[in-house]
Amino acid sequence: MADFPSKVTTETGTTPNSQSNQQGGNSLRGLAANVTTRMDMSFIKSNPSVLMMAQITGGLLHWALIASSPYMWAPANGWVLFVAVTFWLLTTVLFSMILFGAQRRLTAVPWPLTVLVYHGVATFLYLTAFLANAASVQHFSSTYFFGNMAAAAFFAAVVTVAYGVSAFFSYLDWKGDGGNAATSMVPT
């Protein structure tokens, strides 16, 4: 009876070495709560987030339609596919970085200027890709892939506009004109 208190565990909270975490008890619930506290939920509801999701979705559809056709019939489609895949990947990475607050951890990077330059370059290069894609649709006019290439040109136009609008919002954010003028003024 004297050894009874030494066999009793009196843990009241969960620690990294607790038995419930090792056995899988509520570790999934704890992991989900940990991930959601790290996510910037206000970013999800913002216009730049919606535009980036449109860029990711439209970009995916764009390059999937190009890649599913014999894009080498028109040499310009190699450029179109390169731009579409590259900016789809970069936008996905940028979206994830902003969503999980990398700009708060990487303070040495001038984020408003970086995002502005990114969206400006993406707008220009996607515009060239859209024009090349639209010009090459005629090469597929008598084939089964005409619809794919025409739809790809449409999605390229949508993504180009989304990047342009994002560049505009990024410019406003960089200049500091994105908020309410009454709340952003400093009294003198």
Image (cartoon, grey):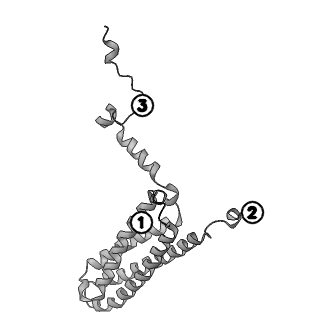
Question: Toward the viewer: 151 or 53?
Answer: 53
Choose the circle earlier in sequence order: 3 or 1: 3
Instruction: Give the quadrant of the C terminus.
Output: bottom right
Choose the circle earlier in sequence order: 1 or 2: 1
Residue drawn where x is 54% and y is 72% of the image? 169
- Quadrant position of residue 63: bottom left
Q: Position of residue 29 (x, y in %)?
A: 39, 42
Dot 1 amino acid type: Leu
In the shown orientation, is residue 59 left or right of residue 110?
A: left
Q: Which residue is mark 2?
A: 187
Question: Toward the viewer: 29 or 22?
Answer: 22
Dot 2 amino acid type: Pro
Q: Within 10 angstroms of label 3, few (less than 14), some, or many (20 or more) residues?
A: few
Q: Position of residue 116 (x, y in %)?
A: 50, 73
In the shown orientation, is residue 70 left or right of residue 160?
A: left
Q: Nearer the viewer, mark 1 or mark 2?
A: 2
Rounded to the nearest angstrom, the CA distance separating label 1 from label 2 is 36 Å
Dot 3 amino acid type: Gly
Residue extending furthest toward the front: 108
Question: Toward the viewer: 87 or 62?
Answer: 87
- Quadrant position of residue 23: top left
Q: Is residue 41 above or below residue 73?
A: above
Question: Toward the viewer: 171 or 137?
Answer: 171
Residue drawn where x is 24% and y is 88% of the image? 73
Q: Which residue is mark 3?
A: 13
Choose the circle earlier in sequence order: 2 or 3: 3
Q: Within 10 angstroms of label 2, few (less than 14), some, or many (20 or more) residues?
A: few
Rounded to the nearest angstrom, the CA distance separating label 3 from label 1 is 37 Å
Q: Position of residue 7 (x, y in %)?
A: 31, 18
In the shown orientation, is residue 165 left or right of residue 96?
A: right
Q: Is residue 12 above or below residue 126?
A: above
Q: Which residue is mark 1?
A: 94
